[in-house]
C-alpha cells in the first residue's frame, strides 16, 4: 500500500485522483470549515473513517507541524501495535489567489508565502516524494525581502520557482524542472493549465511528469461531459440521445471505496440552479456559442441585433432610456445604439461567455455567473461544474451553494470548492507516475 498526505486539500479533488491511482490518504488538512465538511463526508462515503484509517485536520498551515501530522497518523486504529509506515507522497496546492493572473496580483498577499510553510512541513515529515500544484502565475511572482525556512535571504526580485527549488534542495530534495500541464490532455473536459512541481528525496528514483493520455482531436468536450444534464427535457431529448463514455463513467464512479468498489450515483445532487429573471434569461439568449461579453458588445455596435422577441429587455430599455418600444427595437437593429444604451441592454460586465458544446470548457472558476450553457439561457449548476472538473456524480458538495460580497474572503461555498479543486483525473495522472516508483 502506498500512503499519502494531502495538504490544502479543499473539497478533495487531489485526494480523489490519488485514491483512483491507488494511494491511501492517511492525513489531510485544510483551513476551510465548509470545504472540510465536503471532504470528510466524501471520505466517510468511501470508507475512510476519521481516527480509524485516516485523519482530517482543520488547520491553518502555519499552525500545522510534522509532529502533529505524524502523531495523528500513529494514533490511527489501523496502526495500533504496528510500525507507522513512511509517507510515500505529500501533495499540496497552496492558496493561489495571490498568484493568479486573472485579477490584480498582490505581492503583499499573505497567501503568497504559504508555499514556504509547505516546504517547512515537508522538511518535518520527510515524505519520499512531493508534489506542488498552482496556477501559471506562480511561475513569475517576484518577492522582496523573502527569507526561507533554511535561513537563506533571497535577493529582491527572486521568483517563486527558483526560491522553491533552492529551498527543497537545501532540505535534501532534488526536483524536476517545473512543468505546466493542461487538464484536457488527461481526459478532463476543461482547458485548465497548472504549473506542477515534483520533488524527491535525494537518492530515490527520479520520477517523470505524466504524458498526455488524450490527443487534441480526442479532447472531452462540453457535450461529452454534461449534455445529459440539460434541464429542459425537450432540448435534452433532442441533443442527448444516449449517454457518452464520459457521462457513464461519471455516473458509475471512478473513485473506489476502501474495498475497491466504485460508488455509483443513484440520486443526482448539486443540480440546483440560480434563480434568473426574464431580463437575465433574455440577456443570456443574446450570446452566440463561444461569444464573450466584449465580443457581443462589439457585434451589437457594428452589426446591430434584433431584440423584437425579447419583451423584458425591450421594457427595461424603454424605461431606462425613455424611448418607445419601437424606437428601442429600431436603434439596436440598425446598429445605432450608443455605448450608454448598450450598457443598459447588456450591463457593463464583459467577462461572461457562452461556452461551445464541441470544445472543452474554459477554466472552471469560483463564480457561478461567468459562463452560459450552450443549450439553455442559464448559468451552470454546481454538478455541471463538478463534471467539468472530472468529479464523480456521487461526490456531494456541502455548505452554502454560493456567497457574495465580503463573505467571499472567509466562506468557501460549493461553487468555490469546485473551482478551487485540482481536477481528479489530472491528480490521478501525476500520482500514477509516482506510484510506478514505489
Image: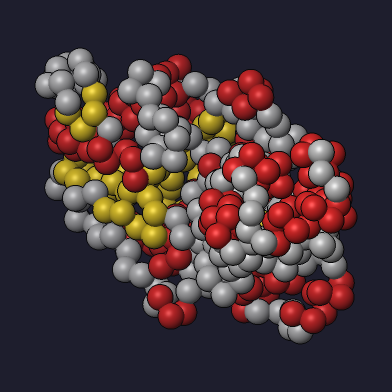
Residue at screen point 58% across, 23% down: 409
Identify which residue is drawn at 35% across, 18% down.
108
Image location (x, y in percent) of residue 202: 15, 43
Nearer-the-camera pick, 115 or 373: 373
Q: Position of residue 433 (x, y in %)?
A: 33, 61
| 152 sits to left or right of 103 | left
> In which quadrant will I find the C terminus?
bottom left
Q: Is residue 191 found left or right of 348 in the rendered image?
A: left
- Is residue 298 visible in the rendered image? The answer is yes
Q: Position of residue 267 (x, y in %)?
A: 83, 60
Q: Quadrant of residue 304?
A: bottom right
Q: Which residue is located at x 35 percent, y 57 percent?
A: 181
Depth order, front residue of 15/283: 283
* Picture coordinates of residue 385, whole percent (x, y): 64, 54
Q: Quadrant of residue 413?
A: top right
- Residue 138 or residue 324, whichever sits in front: 324
- Residue 21 in sight from this viewpoint: no
What is the quadrant of the N terminus in the image? bottom left
Residue 149 lies left or right of residue 391; in this view the side is left
The number of numbered discs placed on residues in the rendered structure image is 0
The colour scheme applied to this rendered structure is: secondary structure
Q: Residue at x 58, y 55 (%)?
A: 301
Amino acid at each position: 500500500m502506498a500512503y499519502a498526505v494531502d495538504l490544502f486539500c479543499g473539497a478533495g479533488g487531489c485526494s480523489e485522483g490519488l485514491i483512483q491511482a491507488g494511494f491511501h490518504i492517511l492525513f489531510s488538512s485544510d483551513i476551510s470549515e465548509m470545504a472540510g465538511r465536503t471532504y470528510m463526508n466524501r471520505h466517510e462515503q468511501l470508507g475512510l473513517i476519521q481516527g480509524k484509517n485516516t485523519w482530517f485536520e482543520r488547520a491553518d498551515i502555519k499552525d500545522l507541524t510534522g509532529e502533529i501530522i505524524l502523531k495523528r497518523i500513529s494514533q490511527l486504529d489501523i496502526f495500533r501495535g504496528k510500525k507507522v509506515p513512511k509517507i510515500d507522497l505529500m501533495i499540496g496546492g497552496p492558496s493561489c489567489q495571490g498568484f493568479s493572473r486573472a485579477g490584480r496580483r498582490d505581492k503583499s498577499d499573505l497567501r503568497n508565502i504559504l508555499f514556504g510553510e509547505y516546504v517547512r512541513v515537508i522538511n518535518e515529515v520527510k515524505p519520499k516524494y512531493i508534489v506542488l500544484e498552482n496556477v501559471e502565475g506562480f511561475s513569475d511572482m517576484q518577492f522582496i525581502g523573502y527569507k526561507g525556512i533554511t535561513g537563506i535571504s533571497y535577493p529582491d526580485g527572486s521568483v517563486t520557482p527558483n526560491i522553491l527549488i533552492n529551498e527543497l534542495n537545501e532540505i535534501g530534495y532534488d526536483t524536476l524542472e517545473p512543468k505546466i500541464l493542461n487538464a484536457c490532455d488527461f481526459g478532463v473536459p476543461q482547458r485548465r493549465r497548472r504549473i506542477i512541481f515534483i520533488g524527491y528525496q535525494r537518492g530515490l528514483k527520479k520520477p517523470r511528469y505524466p504524458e498526455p493520455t488524450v490527443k487534441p482531436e480526442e479532447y472531452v468536450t462540453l457535450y461529452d461531459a454534461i449534455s445529459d444534464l440539460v434541464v429542459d427535457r425537450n432540448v435534452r431529448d433532442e441533443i442527448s440521445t444516449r449517454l457518452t463514455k464520459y457521462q457513464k463513467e461519471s455516473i458509475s464512479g471512478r473513485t473506489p471505496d476502501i474495498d475497491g468498489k466504485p460508488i455509483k450515483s443513484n440520486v443526482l445532487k448539486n443540480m440546483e440552479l440560480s434563480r434568473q429573471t426574464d431580463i437575465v434569461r433574455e440577456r443570456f439568449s443574446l450570446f452566440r456559442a463561444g461569444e464573450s461579453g466584449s465580443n457581443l458588445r462589439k457585434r451589437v455596435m457594428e452589426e446591430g441585433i434584433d431584440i423584437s422577441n425579447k419583451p423584458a429587455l425591450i421594457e427595461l430599455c424603454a424605461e431606462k432610456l425613455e424611448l418607445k418600444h419601437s424606437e428601442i427595437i429600431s436603434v439596436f437593429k440598425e446598429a445605432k445604439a450608443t455605448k450608454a444604451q448598450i450598457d443598459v441592454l447588456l450591463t457593463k460586465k464583459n467577462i461572461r461567455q457562452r461556452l461551445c458544446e464541441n470544445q472543452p470548457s474554459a477554466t472552471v472558476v469560483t463564480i457561478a455567473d461567468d459562463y452560459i450553457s450552450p443549450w439553455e439561457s442559464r448559468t451552470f449548476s454546481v454538478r455541471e461544474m463538478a463534471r467539468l472538473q472530472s468529479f464523480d456524480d456521487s461526490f456531494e458538495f456541502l455548505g452554502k451553494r454560493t456567497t457574495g460580497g465580503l463573505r467571499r474572503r472567509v466562506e468557501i461555498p460549493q461553487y468555490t470548492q469546485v473551482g478551487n479543486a485540482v481536477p481528479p483525473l489530472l491528480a490521478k495522472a501525476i500520482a500514477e507516475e509516482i506510484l510506478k516508483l514505489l
